[in-house]
């Protein structure tokens, strides 16, 4: 498969995954239980290691009343 066709197919696959699973995923560091907001694209393209999590913002859960947990 030519590189240009591969890149288009890969781009479409990534867009379909984002549409299906959402733009961000909640990734929890097992040692601490701290959750991070990680782009689905980064997970698919780079993979995520524990030491990479510090580069991402913390996941903030929104309560039904509108407050942050």
Image (tube, grey):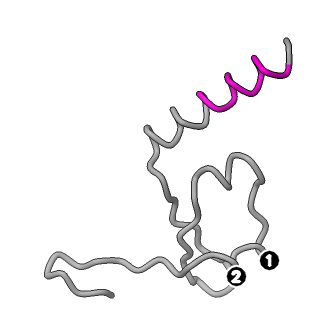
Q: Measuring 51% from the left and 32% from the top, which residue is drawn there? A: 16
* Occupied quadrant, residue 36: bottom right
* Occupied quadrant, residue 7: top right
Farthest-out residue, left? 65
Q: Measuring 59% from the left and 73% from the top, which residue is drawn there? A: 28
Asked if residue 9 lies in the magenta stretch, the reply is yes
Mark 1, secondary structure of its residue: helix
Q: Where is 30 relative to 69, above or below?
A: above
Position of 15 compared to 65: left or right?
right
Q: Where is 3 relative to 59, above or below?
A: above
Q: Which residue position holds label 1?
A: 51
Question: On the rendered image, what quadrant is the C terminus found in?
Answer: bottom left
Q: Where is 33 relative to 16, above or below?
A: below
Q: Which residue position holds label 2?
A: 54
Percent position (x, y) of residue 58?
53, 81
Q: What residue span does the magenta drawing correspond to? A: 3-12
* Occupied quadrant, residue 48: bottom right
Q: Measuring 47% from the left and 77% from the top, which residue is drawn there? A: 59
């Amino acid at each position: 498969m030519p590189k240009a066709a591969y890149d288009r197919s890969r781009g479409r696959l990534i867009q379909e995954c984002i549409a299906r699973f959402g733009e961000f995923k909640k990734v929890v560091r097992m040692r601490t239980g701290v959750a991070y907001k990680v782009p689905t694209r980064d997970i698919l393209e780079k993979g995520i290691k524990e030491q990479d999590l510090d580069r991402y913002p913390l996941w903030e859960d929104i309560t039904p009343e509108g407050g942050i947990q």
